[in-house]
Image: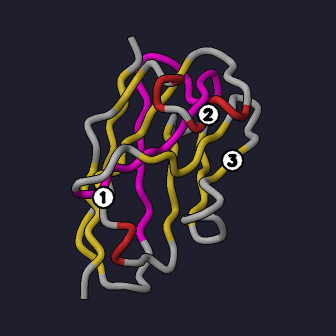
């Protein structure tokens, strides 16, 4: 059974940076497709970034491309989301997700692709 535990959220000012962590247990992180989604107040859950088992990554091109980076550390069995130049619009609960299959790139953007989910970590960007 795969379990995901996120951490690293908090209250930051516009322009600040944060690094979210997702500790994986039950399987090694490189045997899973990993992703980050977020859900802002009154909004639907939104794809942020994903990484295939191979290490290839994809991003929500409209809102986070160039500012957010997904990565993983196999030794720590952890996935990360580095967020730079944070904006108030980035305020949301951020969720880590994982899947044991090999989803194609286009399906990485869909929450229904992912079998396992963490509990979420709150990120609030406010001056």
Disc with the residue nearer the chain's start (3 vs 2) = 3
Residue 83 versus residue 50 in the image, above or below:
below
Location of the N terminus (image quadrant): top left
In this picture, which residue range is highlighted in magenta? Answer: 18-41
Label 3 and label 2: CA atoms lie apart by 8 Å
Disc with the residue nearer the chain's start (1 vs 2) = 1
Q: Is there CB contact under 8 Å for labels 1 and 2?
A: no
Q: Is there CB contact under 8 Å for labels 3 and 2?
A: yes
Q: Which residue is under mark 1?
A: 92
Which residue is drawn at the image coordinates 64% and 29% (left, top)? 107
Q: Is there CB contact under 8 Å for labels 1 and 3?
A: no
Q: Which residue is under mark 2?
A: 108
Residue 102 versus residue 42 in the image, above or below:
above
Instruction: Give the label on residue 53, or none.
Output: none
Which residue is drawn at the image coordinates 49% and 80% (left, top)? 85
Disc with the residue nearer the chain's start (1 vs 3) = 3
Q: Is residue 25 magenta?
A: yes
The answer to whether 123 appears left or right of 55 in the picture is: left
Residue furthest top as drawn: 1
The 10 Å Cα crowd at callout 1, few under 14, some 14 to 19, many 20 or more, is many
Residue 65 percent across, percent down from the top left: 64, 64
């Amino acid at each position: 059974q795969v379990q995901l535990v996120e951490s690293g959220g908090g209250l930051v000012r516009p322009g600040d940076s944060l690094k979210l962590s997702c500790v994986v247990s039950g399987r090694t992180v490189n045997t899973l497709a990993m992703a980050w989604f977020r859900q802002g107040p009154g909004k639907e859950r939104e794809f942020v970034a994903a990484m295939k088992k191979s290490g290839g990554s994809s991003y929500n091109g409209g809102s986070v491309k160039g500012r957010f980076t997904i990565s993983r550390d196999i030794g720590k069995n952890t996935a990360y989301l580095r967020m730079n130049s944070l904006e108030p619009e980035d305020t949301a609960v951020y969720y880590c997700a994982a899947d044991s299959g090999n989803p194609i790139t286009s399906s990485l953007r869909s929450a229904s692709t992912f079998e396992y989910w963490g509990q979420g970590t709150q990120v609030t960007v406010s001056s």
